[in-house]
Amino acid sequence: MSHRTFYNFIDHRGEDVISDWLRDRKTPKGTKVQLDSRLNVLANVMSLDARPNAAYLAFKNGVDCRGLFEVRLKVKNQHLRIIGYEGPDGQCATLLVCCREKDREFVDPKDPCGIAKKRIADLESGRGDIVEYFRKV
C-alpha cells in the first residue's frame, strides 16, 4: 500500500502543466519513464527526502524554497527537476513545475520555487486544480 498519491497541477486555463512539459519536444525522450519510476518509489517511502531520487528544498539560487521538494531526474545528460509540495492533504503530493538544472542552479525556468508557490496560492484560492499523475500522458 502506498503512503501517498501524486497529482499534477492544473492551471486556471485547465492545462495540466506537468503533462504538457512531458510532451514538449524540448523534454528529452525517456523523461516520463524515469519520472514514473521515481514516483513509484517515492509513493512508498515515508519521507520525500529520499536522496538521490528526491529532496526537500530550503534555499536555492538565493530563493526561499522551504515547503517544497524536488524529484531529481537525469535524462540524456540533462539534470531535470520536478518541484512539488506535500498537499493539499497529508496523503498526497502535488507536482507544480518542471525545470532544468545546470551546475546546481535552476536555469529553465530560473525561479521554479516562486512559480511553485504561486501555484500553491492558486490552488488555495480555487484558481487551480489537481489531477492524479498516473495516467497516460
Image (cartoon, rainbow, N blue to C red):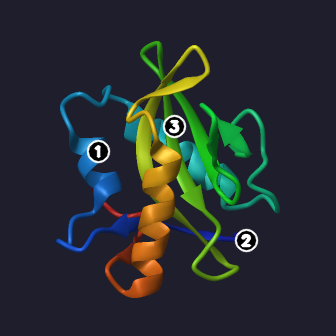
Q: In which quarter of the image is residue 85?
A: bottom right
Q: Distance between the residues labelled 2 and 1?
A: 26 Å
Give the class, few, some or many, for how many residues have Cα within 10 Å of label 3's Cα (few <14, many ≥20).
many
Question: Closer to us: mark 3 or mark 2?
Answer: 3
Q: Residues within 10 Å of mark 1 (few under 14, many from 20)?
A: some
Does residue 43 appear to the left or right of 73 in the view shown?
A: right
Against 71, is 12 above or below?
Answer: below
User: As rendered, which of 3 and 105 lies closer to the eye?
Assistant: 105
- Residue positioned 70% across, 41% down in the render: 59
Which of the marked residues, 3 or 2, is nearer the chain's N terminus? 2
Q: Can residue 54 be seen in this view?
A: no
Q: Residue at x 66, y 61 (%)?
A: 43
Residue sitting at x 41%, y 64%: 8
Q: Are the residues tagged 3 and 2 within 8 Å (C-beta)?
A: no
Where is residue 12? Give x, y as percent: 24, 74
Q: How many marks?
A: 3
Residue 124 at x, y percent in the picture: 47, 83
Relative horizontal placement of residue 135, taking residue 49 as reference (left or right)? left
Identify the residue under disc 3: 81
**What kind of element bears circle 3?**
strand
**CA gap, disc 3 and disc 1:** 12 Å
Query: In this view, which residue lies farthest toward the bottom?
Result: 126
At which x and y percent is residue 27?
A: 29, 31
Q: Does 70 appear above or below 16?
A: above
Left or right, 8 with reference to 49: left
Quadrant for residue 131, please give it.
bottom left
Tell me the quarter of the picture where residue 58 sits.
top right
